[in-house]
Amino acid sequence: MKSLSQFFAVALLAASASALADAPGVSHDRIRVASIQDLSGPIAMLGTPVRDAMQMRFDEVNAAGGVHGRTIELLIEDAAYDPKRAVLAARKLVQRDQAFAFLANMGTPVVMATMPMIVEAGRPHLFPFAPHELTYTPQHPMKFQIFAPYQDYMDAAVRYMVTERGYERTCLLYQDDDYGLEVMRGVDAGLGKLGTELVARTSYKRGATDFSSQVARLRAAECDLVVLATVVRETVATMMEARKIGWDVDMLVTASGYSAQTHELGGAAVEGLYGVTVMPHPYAEGASPELADWIDRYRTRFGVAPNVWSVMGYVIADLFVQGAELAGPELTVQSFVTAMATLNTEGDIFGGPAYRFTADDHLGNRSGRLAQIRDGRWQILTDYLE
């Protein structure tokens, strides 16, 4: 006959096995998390620093003993900003790799194509780089977002720009996909509240490099403010084209164009560009001692200075760690999403917002700030816009 201690040992193992069965990608000593990035396509300059910073944060946590004794393994798939490739990557990560959760998936077209599969598989879908309302609505236990939706922050940003600076002929250049259409809805809503509307709108296909026809069309419409639903490379190309033909119109880009690469690539052509962001760029000059130390560690490891995408990747990884800590030693999908729905953060060394989640609201932040490129660097101009 088994001793009482043997009986309890067997019962404990059985209970642990049952818990782990509800936690794909979780073993007694490891948590596997996944991210679908662009490492070789048109926004690889964003995906690479996001990946690097997430890995940096997880390595720090692992070196300190992990989360309740479990190390975090980051699985990365490169979709090159291609929704079809992203679907194949998501299927692999869900079915073969058994990822516990997905973090920071990159790009609205990618996210819109893969999110239904991930959520249906019962995997947490966390903080994608797709400020689209479907990433947090309708309410779903698996969906969490920290990036203010395009519609909300572009509504507020356009109203602020028109009201404060007196523009009378606002126009829009947008990427012809879910990303661009969401921005358009926000711009239309903001202008509608002011009793006006877009004078002209023109689109481009994802991955385009020539914007001469679009810029000519907008100039012919006599726009005095051009809103850009573009990413970094396309933002730079558009402004260079405008300056080349002598058109010095003001432009406002979404957070997808708010990056150090914008002024590094664009130089004088992008001086004066307005942009929307949730946090300052991590410039070494003027950084606090804590931020300066982080910048040095990042630069030492990766050989380049961090940018705002590095910061966001690091913050996303840290939010996952906080949620997993709150979930406790018996980590399951249910315990994790329950913990995430109670997570409230304070300010951080990066100057970002506080994030607040509740059982009824999985969008951690709803607002953006206005910034402008001045003397070759982004400067924050406003507090969070409502």
Image: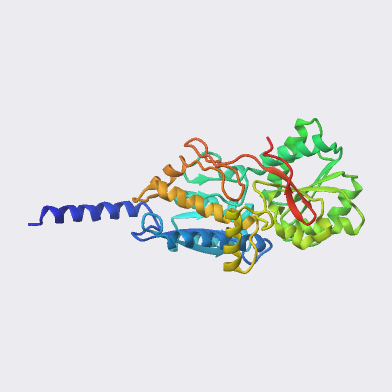
- In the rendered image, the residue lying farthest to the left is 1
Q: Position of residue 19 (x, y in %)?
A: 32, 51
Q: Position of residue 142 (x, y in %)?
A: 48, 46
- In the rendered image, the residue lying farthest to the bottom is 303
Residue 326 to residue 90: above or below: above
- At a point 29% along the width and 55% down the height, the residue shown is 17
Q: Position of residue 16 (x, y in %)?
A: 28, 53
Residue 291 to residue 141: above or below: below
State the image quarter where residue 189 is shown.
top right
Q: Is residue 197 visible?
A: no
- At a point 78% along the width and 31% down the height, the residue shown is 194
State the image quarter where residue 212 is shown.
bottom right
Residue situated in front as seen by the camera: 316 or 279: 279
Q: Is residue 355 visible?
A: yes
Q: Is residue 334 left or right of residue 87?
A: left
Quarter of the image with the C terminus in it: top right
Residue situated in front as seen by the camera: 30 or 238: 30
Q: Is residue 378 left or right of residue 20?
A: right
Quarter of the image with the N terminus in it: bottom left
- At a point 10% along the width and 57% down the height, the residue shown is 2
